[in-house]
Image: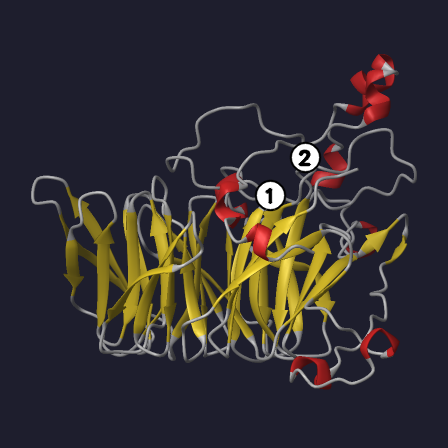
Amino acid sequence: MDMEGNKRVFQRLGGGPSTASDSRHHPQQQQQQQKVCFHWRAGKCTRHPCPFLHRELPAPAQPLSNGGAPKRFAEDSGSQFLRRGPKFTGGSNTWGRVHGGNAVAKKTEKLCNYWVQGNCTYGDKCRYLHSWSLGDCFDMLTQLEGHQKVVTGIAFPSGSGNLYTGSKDETLRVWDCQSGQCAGVINLGGEIGCMISEGPWVFVGLPNLVKAYNTQSNADLSLNGPVGQVYAMVVGNGLLFAGIQDGSILAWKFNAATNGFEPAASLSGHTLGVVSLVVGANRLYSGSMDNSIRVWNLETLQCMQILTDHTSVVMSVLCWDQFLLSCSLDKTIKVWVASDSGNLEVTYTHNEEHGVLHLCGMHDSEVKPVLMCSCNDNCVRAYDLPSFAERGKIFAKNEIRAIEVGPGGLFFTGDGTGQVRVWKWRDSP
């Protein structure tokens, strides 16, 4: 691969979803296939083959709600979770199944440790992998060097020509999207626990503080109130939520008159730090070091349900379609769906060999949903949904703690050594 030729990685923003070539020659078949299977959406289709689509149709071209930034799974979620019918049984759903059988992860090659250190003498004859990825679905375009400790946040604010990365080395780095070079370093005087963007805003979680930067107006604001490290943030229903080390969740609301953020609420209930947040289906979901997930009503900010199926820290929560996905250091990814009573229940559990650190949902070049799953074996696995069939792997020298979706099939990873890598989904042949 021509690495130098790909230095201007962020110029590669074009390319839309591909369409199946045979649909042009069989219009009747195309018309039939344009309907998404209702039972597949509910996670319980048993027809093999099924005459309807087992994937979502690409959305019609329209301006995105957050100013052109790529959509994540939570933004694609419906207004409410799908409730299971009375005939639903755990064995009849399609989670973790491919063509009626359980998906089995392929035994992939092992990364060559000598190659990682730059001193493998076997070259092409080495029996181990000499690549940072495995599979034919994405390519690494370049890597961004500069951070000295683990990368804890990556943000690509809409309308900006820069990528922002935050690290426990107490710095926020700004990268020029044309050259791939570092355009600036901001020393914040505290470890960055998380970072997100919403529109032109970049929010940075620090000890006892949230910093808010507006990339268009250059506004630089400090949001006080947190006690301890800010581990997670999310925006929903006009509020900025932050998960704090002391177990609380703080909320701020933007005041257009003062061009600032004002305290709006404090949500209490977790007994240990809140390390993951996501908004979907008019709910806020929080994962905590106390091994639980709490479900909050976004309108009333009251806790509606406490999920206690995980046996270790809930590291990440994610909304996809009508489902909530959660991962934990207990080596599982759980899929939740609403029961007849409206409460969430586990409909599928995917087991990993290692603790799961982070989940990120995105779409490949064919607009198929893919789950990126980072584990504490220094590896990210790409899974098709809902089958959990493995698509590929990404390797790193240390744990990958940050994954962020970019435009035009790009995505970014940040690992424990401070390296940020830029990836791109391959176009379908």
- Looking at the image, residue 146 lies above or below residue 53: below
Residue in view at x 86 percent, y 51 percent: 98
> Residue 394: horizontal and vertical position, in percent?
67, 66
Say the numbered circle drawn on residue 160: none
Q: Quadrant of residue 97?
A: bottom right
- Circle 1/circle 2 CB separation < 8 Å: yes
- In the image, 145 versus 238, the foreground residue is 145
Query: Number of numbered discs present?
Result: 2
Question: x, y percentage for residue 214?
Answer: 23, 49
Residue 89 left/right relative to 423 = right
**Pointer 2: what residue?**
56
Apparent side of residue 218 relative to residue 94 in the rendered image (left or right): left
Name the amino acid, label 1: Asp
- Residue underneath mark 1: 321
Q: Quadrant of residue 267?
A: bottom left
| Disc number lying in front (1 or 2) | 2
Instruction: Name the one closer to the observer, 196 or 230.
Output: 196
| Residue type at numbered disc 2 | Glu
What residue sits 44% from the left and 71% below the top? 151
Asked if residue 93 lies left or right of residue 186, the reply is right
| 327 or 196: nearer the viewer | 196
